[in-house]
């Protein structure tokens, strides 16, 4: 990809993607997007998809490796740096209830999603896993991190991200409304565990938590970070499972186990960050760079997503995400009640 004769064109492709990512970052500062909790990652994939379905045929073919580089290498770098958003002290801060809720929500949501997606809705494996990962762990970032493990096509990631947008945004408005209407009988702290344990995107969690109150918001963000932390073991387990049982037409065949090393580095970075060796201002700068890298990756995924690829998928991913959304609301509530009673 970075062969000497193609290096200039690849860099041109990367710079082209970065222009879209900068536009997404700029737009994310608009009041309407801040109010809705819509991150630059989401705006980036929308801009990329608009471009893919309008002017993509004008893109020099020699620049395509730059787009692919953004969807693969920059994506992995972004996931590794995501570890600077976490510390192991976050886990201690919310205690056993936050940990139990996070583990139970992630595990149960993925199992239910995989069974419903592949057995009931007859969705393909990759779309099912990507959609379920987005619902169970941390929205668009989870979809991005899972895509290299399943080696799925970019348009399937875009489909999964679209379900995160729909149901994550719905949850962001619905949870505070139901709580203030007295329909969710939880304390402010337990409501924070509920929000952090069941809403899709980090931005959605922040918005919903703040809509309820400061105590709820603080707990919600910490629990959400624990769910994000579970991304690494989830990817490792998924990688081993997929390698041991790759479904082809009516058969199972053994394949070589591929360890997603970026997930391992993600944990190491979070562990390093727990020692507070790095000044807070530098961590903040790293997080800003990381957000931009992930925005570039999302934008590039969008650029690889044309409407023609959606034709054979239909509404099934939306149905799957809707079922998981209902599970997160009702099943998640009882998981929180169980976890807080321990």
Image: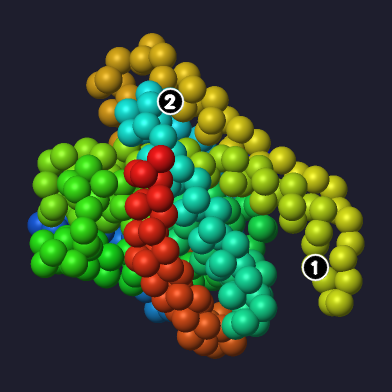
Say which residue appears at 26% left-offset and 46% top-offset.
190
**Quadrant assignment, res 94:** top left
Q: Is residue 13 visible?
A: no
Q: Residue furthest front?
A: 341
Taking depth in this image into account, of 78 and 314 the one nearest to the observer is 314
Of residues 105 and 31, the one nearer the viewer is: 105
- Taking the image as shown, residue 317 lies to the left or right of residue 222, namely right
Task: Look at the numbered disc 1 and give the secondary structure of its residue.
Answer: strand
Q: Would residue 170 be found to the left or right of residue 15 on screen?
A: left
Residue 96 in view: yes
Mark closest to the chain's N terminus, 1 or 2:
2
Tell me which corner region of the image, top left, top right, bottom left or bottom right, holds residue 323: bottom left
User: Quick check: 113 above or below 34?
Assistant: below
Q: Residues within 10 Å of mark 1 (few under 14, many from 20)?
A: few
Residue at the image position 39 percent from the left and 72 percent from the top = 326
The label on residue 88 is 2
Residue 285: x percent and y percent? Answer: 30, 28
Give me the disc on residue 295: none
Which residue corresponds to the image point at 64% horizontal and 63% vertical from the top-left?
152
For label 1, the residue is 247
Residue 160 percent location from the top left of the image? 48, 67
Of marks 1 and 2, the one in the foreground = 2
Tell me where residue 50 appears, x and y as whole percent: 37, 73
Q: Secondary structure at mark 2?
A: helix
For disc 2, the neighbor class at 10 Å (few under 14, some 14 to 19, many from 20) is: some
Q: Residue at x 41, y 40 (%)?
A: 342
In the picture provided, is 309 more to the left or to the right than 335? Answer: right
């Amino acid at each position: 990809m970075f062969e000497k004769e193609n290096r200039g064109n690849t860099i041109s492709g990367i710079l082209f993607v970065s222009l879209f990512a900068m536009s997404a970052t700029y737009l994310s500062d608009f009041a309407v997007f801040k109010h809705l909790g819509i991150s630059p990652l989401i705006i980036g994939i929308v801009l990329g998809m608009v471009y893919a379905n309008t002017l993509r045929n004008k893109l020099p073919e020699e620049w395509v490796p730059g787009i692919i580089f953004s969807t693969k290498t920059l994506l992995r770098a972004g996931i590794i740096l995501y570890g600077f958003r976490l510390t192991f002290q976050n886990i201690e801060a919310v205690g056993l209830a936050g940990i139990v809720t996070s583990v139970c929500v992630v595990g149960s949501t993925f199992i239910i999603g995989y069974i419903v997606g592949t057995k009931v809705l007859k969705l393909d494996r990759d779309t099912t896993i990507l959609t379920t990962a987005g619902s169970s762990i941390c929205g668009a970032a989870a979809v991005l991190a899972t895509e290299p493990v399943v080696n799925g096509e970019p348009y399937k990631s875009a489909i999964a991200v679209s379900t995160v947008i729909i149901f994550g945004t719905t949850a962001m408005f619905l949870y505070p409304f139901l709580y203030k209407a007295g329909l969710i009988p939880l304390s402010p702290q337990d409501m924070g565990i509920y929000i952090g344990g069941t809403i899709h995107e980090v931005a959605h969690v922040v918005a919903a938590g703040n809509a309820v109150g400061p105590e709820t918001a603080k707990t919600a963000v910490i629990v959400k970070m624990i769910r994000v932390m579970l991304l690494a073991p989830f990817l490792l387990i998924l990688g081993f499972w997929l390698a041991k049982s790759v479904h082809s037409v009516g058969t199972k065949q053994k394949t070589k186990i591929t360890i997603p090393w970026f997930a391992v580095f993600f944990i190491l970075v979070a562990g390093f960050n727990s020692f507070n060796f790095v000044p807070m201002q530098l961590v903040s700068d790293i997080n800003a760079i990381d957000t931009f890298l992930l925005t570039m990756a999302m934008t590039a995924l969008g650029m690889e997503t044309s409407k023609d690829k959606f034709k054979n998928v239909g509404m099934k991913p939306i149905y799957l995400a809707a079922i998981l959304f209902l599970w997160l609301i009702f099943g998640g509530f009882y998981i929180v009640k169980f976890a807080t009673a321990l």
